Image (cartoon, rainbow, N blue to C red):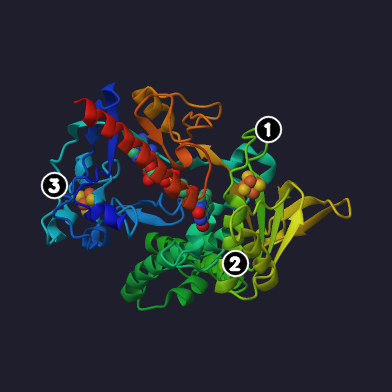
């Protein structure tokens, strides 16, 4: 990506969308909408001062909703171009309120609240679609209780937890525990506010709240207006304190998740959803279990799958290495159900196909290896490009020409064509580029 960003013959148009296309192979006329970022790409240095000072915090979609980001943000740290973007939906200034803090603190003078979407028209010889995939929504399988059990998460959410740049800086803190820690922080804030308020009464009446409250309860202060208010505030403070202490005691028992279950084929190889194998999930679950063990050597992982599809050079050896050195065991069988257990420990119910018995086991966290679903925007893009989709919703190709779509001059690579891992996506991208060059050469000869 860095090389593409610097290449003299490549114009990167990030944060843009193809709106329409006319013409034919060799001479397509494309209309592209470059969306307003409200930040000048050429001036933004990516320093992040604006994001630090922005008062608005929203759910961070790059971290799969785990944690927050500012209304002005960079999608992720290594993104090219290295620029920030204002999220117009949440920005105070763009919604008619007073703010403009980012503009004041930006040393590069890059903020431009008047920026508008820009239309760019291009004439191109060929098009390559590399629009990727979406993650299957596991709440479509109610028996896995993805929405009800906080410690049942998707592989992508787990990847973000494992990442040093993620919401927990790479620590496997369980979502349910994180909620408690957040609650404690909120109660700390409330307690501080209450203490400040009580301090005013204490100063006025030269008495600590605790002594006053004891006296008030024994009827010494009657029902004078100030006394009733003070007593109410002290009572509320005691409630906050007791809730906070109870949560703190609970939090003392928290530790990082060390007993992990990975459930394979969630939405894949399932005739209710996608009958195909998503290809990459067996290997990414093994990778994630190995990394979790590297972070915390006491980690034990169980991978539940109908079979482990380690197809590729060195993949089977990687799987065995995971078993021998990273405390991974592989259980054959499709998990029937996940139930809630004590202390938010999800319980996995499965058939042990060797002993042919139904078993159950509680884990710290369960990770669902979700299917590779066709991208939500692919349908619209295919219609704009007038290319057909296959039965699942990926771009249709034929087996003899796997990067040619049904429209001449339009090619496809990666998961927009079908599920595949990164090396395969990259090599398919080279094939698509070669096919596009063939079109351009033909066009050049003719014109
Ligand atoms: C949890 C998890 C872990 C994985 N780990 C690995 C791993 O370790 N190794 C490995 O080889 N593979 C791994 N994979 C698989 C890997 O993610 C895919 O192979 C790879 O992302 C496919 O690349 P792609 O370019 O086709 O699609 P994507 O990576 O999805 O990229 C598509 C891009 O197109 C953009 N886009 C979408 N629609 C449009 C549009 N209409 N206009 C403009 N842009 C658009 C998207 O925003 C996105 O940036 C993992 C997958 C998952 C789910
Ligand atoms: S103007 Fe918008 S983006 Fe800038 S600091 Fe205020 S809320 Fe954040
Ligand atoms: S790669 Fe493994 S987990 Fe993914 S669909 Fe295929 S068999 Fe299932």
Image coords of residue 57 (percent x, y): 34, 53
Which residue is at a point 52% across and 45% down the rendered structure image?
Answer: 420
Image coords of residue 7 (percent x, y): 22, 53
Task: Give the labeled residue for mark 1.
Answer: 271
Residue 393 left/right relative to 98: right
Residue 290 marker: 2
Residue 265, picture quadrant: top right
Image coords of residue 20 (percent x, y): 28, 25
Task: Give the labeled residue for mark 3.
Answer: 112
Can residue 55 be seen in this snapshot?
A: no
Residue 200 left/right relative to 374: left
Q: Secondary structure at mark 3?
A: loop
Residue situated in front as seen by the camera: 424 or 18:
424
- The answer to whether marks 1 and 3 mark residues whose Cβ atoms lie closer than 8 Å is no
- The answer to whether marks 2 and 3 mark residues whose Cβ atoms lie closer than 8 Å is no
Quadrant for the C terminus, please.
top left
Does residue 221 lie above or below 82 as drawn? below
């Amino acid at each position: 990506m860095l090389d593409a960003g610097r290449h003299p013959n490549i114009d990167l148009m990030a944060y843009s969308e193809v709106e329409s296309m006319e013409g034919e192979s060799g001479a397509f006329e494309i209309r592209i909408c470059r969306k307003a970022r409200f930040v000048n790409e050429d001036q933004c240095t990516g320093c992040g001062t604006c994001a630090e000072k922005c008062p608005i915090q929203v759910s961070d979609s790059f971290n799969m909703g785990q944690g927050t980001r500012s209304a002005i943000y960079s999608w992720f740290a290594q993104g090219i171009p290295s620029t920030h973007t204002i999220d117009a939906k949440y920005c105070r200034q763009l919604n008619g309120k007073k703010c403009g803090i980012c503009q004041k603190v930006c040393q590069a003078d890059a903020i431009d609240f008047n920026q508008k979407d820009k239309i760019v028209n291009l004439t191109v010889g060929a098009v390559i679609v590399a629009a990727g995939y979406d993650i299957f929504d596991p709440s479509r399988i109610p028996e896995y209780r993805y929405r009800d059990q906080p410690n049942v998460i998707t592989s992508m959410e787990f990847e973000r937890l494992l990442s040093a740049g993620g919401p927990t800086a790479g620590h496997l803190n369980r979502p349910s525990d994180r909620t408690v820690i957040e609650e404690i922080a909120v109660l700390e804030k409330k307690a501080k506010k209450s203490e400040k308020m009580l301090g005013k009464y204490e100063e006025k009446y030269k008495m600590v709240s605790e002594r006053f409250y004891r006296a008030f309860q024994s009827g010494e202060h009657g029902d004078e207006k100030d006394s009733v208010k003070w007593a109410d505030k002290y009572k509320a403070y005691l409630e906050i304190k007791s809730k906070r202490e109870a949560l703190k005691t609970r939090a003392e028992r928290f530790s990082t998740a060390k007993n992990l279950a990975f459930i394979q084929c969630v939405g894949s190889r399932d005739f209710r959803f996608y009958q195909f194998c998503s290809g990459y999930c067996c290997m990414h679950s093994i990778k994630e279990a190995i990394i979790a063990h590297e972070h915390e050597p006491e980690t034990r992982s169980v991978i539940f799958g109908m079979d482990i599809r380690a197809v590729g050079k060195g993949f089977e050896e990687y799987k065995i290495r995971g078993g021998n050195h990273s405390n991974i065991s592989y259980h054959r069988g499709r998990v029937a159900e996940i139930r809630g257990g004590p202390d938010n420990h999800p319980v996995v119910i499965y058939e042990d196909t060797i002993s042919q018995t139904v078993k159950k086991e509680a884990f710290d966290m369960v990770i669902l290896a979700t299917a590779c679903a066709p991208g939500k925007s692919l349908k619209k893009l295919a219609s704009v490009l007038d290319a057909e989709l296959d039965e699942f919703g990926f771009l249709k190709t034929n087996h003899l020409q796997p990067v040619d779509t049904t429209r001449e001059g339009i090619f496809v690579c990666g998961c927009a064509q079908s599920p595949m891992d990164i090396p395969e996506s990259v090599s398919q991208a080279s094939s698509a580029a070669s096919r596009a060059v063939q079109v351009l050469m033909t066009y050049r000869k003719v014109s």
